[in-house]
Image: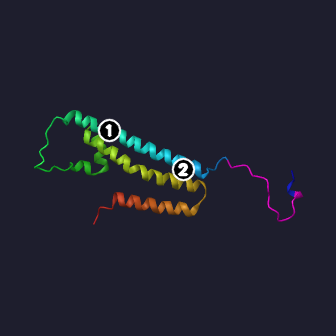
Amino acid sequence: MSSPSDRPQGAPDTQASAPDPGRWNDTQVEQIIGNLLRAGVFLAATVTFIGGVLYLWRYGALHPDYRLFRGEPAELRSVGGTLRFALEGRRRGIIQVGILLLIATPIARVVFSTYAFARERDRLYVGLTLVVLAILLYSLFWGHIG
């Protein structure tokens, strides 16, 4: 084993440096993102399923009148109204919270990716993922205007 003083000047260090315990490798980041996506989809499916079962339990025997279209109540057209309906135990609100969780899952992925790139001090990819996040949030909140 040679010491740094035994190497000729300008020669590369051939000793493997120990991995930095504070850094993540690509495989770890991919595993975390995969787990995040799986957990988000599972949670969304579970909430939607529970809301659907409760809805069918209460309204499953009713026969809908398809001659008259009744859209969603105005309260369910906003995130706040949807959350209020769900917290009050209203079945359609619970179903829509599940859908909101499904929509939030890829957004959470982009947020986590931004964090992972920032932790790695990769400013280029932090900037790119922030642009993607801005586009996602814009389309979610203001994309229907105009």
Residue nearest the viewer, comparing 68 with 100: 68
Q: Pick the quarter of the image with the C terminus.
A: bottom left
Instruction: Please give the name of the residue rendered at 13% of the width and 47% of the height, measured from the top-left corner.
Output: 66
- Would residue 88 be found to the left or right of residue 61 on screen? right
- Please state the horizontal and vertical placement of residue 111, each as a whole percent of the image: 48, 53
Determine whether label 2 and label 1 are within 8 Å by CB.
no
| Number of numbered markers | 2
Identify the mark at residue 49; answer none if there is no mark: 1
- Would residue 56 be found to the left or right of residue 67 on screen? right
Q: In this view, does 141 lie above or below 53?
A: below
Q: Quadrant of residue 54?
A: top left
- Please state the horizontal and vertical placement of residue 78, each as a whole percent of the image: 29, 51
Mark 2 is surrounded, within 10 Å at the Cα level, by few (under 14), some (14 to 19) or many (20 or more) other residues, namely few
Give the colour scheme of this rendering: rainbow
Mark 1 is surrounded, within 10 Å at the Cα level, by few (under 14), some (14 to 19) or many (20 or more) other residues, namely some
Instruction: Please give the name of the residue rendered at 26% of the width and 51% of the height, measured from the top-left corner.
Output: 77
What kind of element bears circle 1?
A: helix
Q: Which of marks 2 and 1 is nearer the N terminus?
A: 2
Residue nearest the viewer, comparing 89 with 61: 61
Res 56 seen here: yes
In magenta segment, residue 64: no
What kind of element bears circle 2?
A: helix
Q: Is residue 6 above or below residue 81?
A: below
Instruction: Please give the name of the residue rendered at 23% of the width and 36% of the height, measured from the top-left corner.
Output: 56
- Would residue 39 be found to the left or right of residue 51 on screen? right
Q: Is residue 121 above or below residue 22?
A: below
Q: Quadrant of residue 133?
A: bottom left
Q: Mark 2 points at which residue?
A: 30
Task: Give the magenta-colored segment's residue range.
Answer: 5-20
Q: Is the magenta stretch mostly helix, strand or loop?
A: loop
